[in-house]
Image (tube, rainbow, N blue to C red):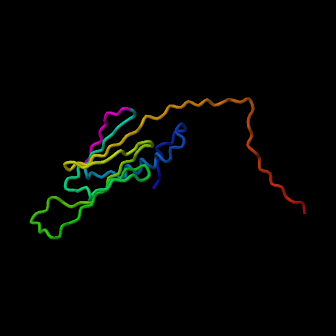
Amino acid sequence: MTRVMQFNSPFLLGFDEMERLLERAVKASDGYPPYNVEQRQAERGEALRITLAVAGFSRDELSVTVEDNQLVIRGRQNDDDARTYLHRGIAARQFQRSFVLADGIEVRHAHLENGLLMIDLEKPEPERRVRTIEISETVEKPASRRVERDAV
């Protein structure tokens, strides 16, 4: 399969990792569990909340981790073998939902309430830095590497 470069502009240098993150995000798109992403008020920077509908899952059956700039939420329910179902419309389904996080986004906390898992994220406002680059009149040449050989 040929790989199509999304960031092939000469003005976008060093965005290879971003392209890999986008590919990972596209692969992780499954419809279960449904979720919302909302922007919230923040004193400085940005604040987001991801809410997942995880009805039937207890806190012990859910895990929230951050792995290489990726927020991963996993749910695993155990089947109760002691029950005999005449009809089973609510499946004990395991899931994994992933969200790619931009650099600087921090997971503040997660809580479970009324079947909704809410994960609060924050991206503090970055410090603005301006750096002046001096322009010299001469070209600095890199140190050349000489190979000296012994005369035989």
Q: Residue furthest bottom?
A: 82
Q: Is residue 121 left or right of residue 86?
A: right
Q: Of 55 and 137, which appears nearest the observer?
A: 55
Q: Of 88 and 104, which appears nearest the observer?
A: 104
Q: Residue furthest right?
A: 152
Q: Is residue 124 above or below residue 95?
A: above
- Which quadrant is the C terminus positioned in? bottom right
Point out residue 20 in the picture as x, y percentages from the top left corner. Answer: 45, 49
- Exactly how many numbered labels are in the figure? 0
User: Is 42 part of what is drawn in magenta?
Assistant: yes
Point out residue 45 in the picture as x, y percentages from the top left corner. Answer: 40, 34
- Which quadrant is the N terminus positioned in? bottom left
Point out residue 13 in the picture as x, y percentages from the top left corner. Answer: 54, 41
**At 46% across and 45% down in the image, what residue appears?**
18
Q: Is residue 2 above or below residue 79?
A: above
Point out residue 50 in the picture as x, y percentages from the top left corner. Answer: 30, 44
Q: Is residue 26 above or below residue 12?
A: below
Assign the magenta stretch its main secondary structure: strand
Part of the protein shown in magenta: 34-43
**At 52% across and 39% down in the image, what residue appears?**
12
Q: In this view, does 71 lie to the left or right of 92?
A: right
**At 77% across and 47% down in the image, what residue appears?**
144
User: Residue 39 is drawn in which quadrant?
Assistant: top left
